[in-house]
Amino acid sequence: MTSAPVLPDGWRLVALDRVGSTNDEAARLAEQGATEGTIVWAREQTGGRGRRGRAWASPPGNLYTSTVLRPACPAMRAAELGFVAALAVADMVRDGRSVRVKWPNDVMVDGGKVAGILLESAIGQGGTVEHVVAGIGVNVGFAPDLPEMRYPGATLGGTVEAALEGLAAALATRLAEWRRDGFAAVRAAWLRCAGPLGTEVDVRLGDELVRGRFGGVDGEGALLLETDAGPRRIVSGELMGRAA
């Protein structure tokens, strides 16, 4: 694709050659009143970041975007949008390739990580979300090889422009589903794309490593783990196993 990406109706593209962080730029625009569907897209990031403050390699050749969302939901529901974003990335993968989502918001293709997702929210005085910036980076042309990466990388292939167009369309569709049918429908779709229930996994909780069997996620998106000491509900952590 060589023409400008086509976005869903009402969505707006802010295209940049180079930026420190697309999330920071999208947050700045959101604070100035940018509407939902404003996508900040950069060919290169110089200060990209992932979950827990990890640096995210962002040279030209892959897709780096941050989308302004205005879900008008209680703060406790903002994390649901991470599952929405993960499903949107999974929807981009061509038929014939193995795609899995991994809690809380990784997407794996043919056993390798293909995307990074970082949500950052602004909460109003009444406890309602004012906006969410959904930062989504997708490996299109190459997979970064970083020492801190827990999984091998994978690539989507094609052009960055086509990936952007596909992501925007999928994200709009999944957002509409979330608004129409609630998190229950998103959760069901996510579980269908996750690893099998009962898969052995490790979860890092700070300095603690918890081992158990994947039991899905509950209605609030928390990880359910069956351990030898009994069931556990995990709200925040890093899943270290190769499935789910």
Image (cartoon, grey):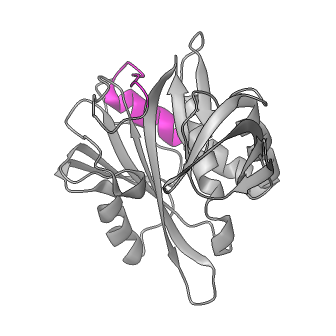
Image position of 24 with respect to 217: above or below: below
Residue most extreme to the top: 96
In the image shown, does 213 or 86 lie closer to the viewer? Answer: 213
What is the magenta range?
Answer: 151-170
Residue most extreme to the front: 229
Q: Is residue 156 magenta?
A: yes
Taking the spot 59% from the left edge, 57% from the top edge, the residue there is: 236
Taking the spot 58% from the left edge, 32% from the top edge, the residue there is: 241
Q: Quadrant of residue 30?
A: bottom left
In the image shown, does 160 or 147 lie closer to the viewer? Answer: 147
Q: Is residue 161 magenta?
A: yes
Image position of 136 with respect to 67: above or below: above
Residue 23 position within the rendered picture, expressed as x and y whole percent measured from the top left? 35, 59
Q: Quadrant of residue 148?
A: top left
Left or right side of 150 for 18: left
Image position of 62 with respect to 38: above or below: above
Left or right side of 239 for 133: left
Residue 159 position within the rendered picture, expressed as x and y whole percent measured from the top left? 33, 24
- The quarter in which the C terminus is drawn is top right
In the image shown, does 153 or 3 lie closer to the viewer? Answer: 153
Residue 166 position within the rendered picture, expressed as x and y whole percent measured from the top left? 49, 32
- The quarter in which the N terminus is drawn is top left
Taking the spot 33% from the left edge, 43% from the top edge, the residue there is: 64
Left or right side of 36 for 25: left
Residue 59 position within the rendered picture, expressed as x and y whole percent measured from the top left? 20, 37
In the image shown, does 232 or 242 lie closer to the viewer? Answer: 232
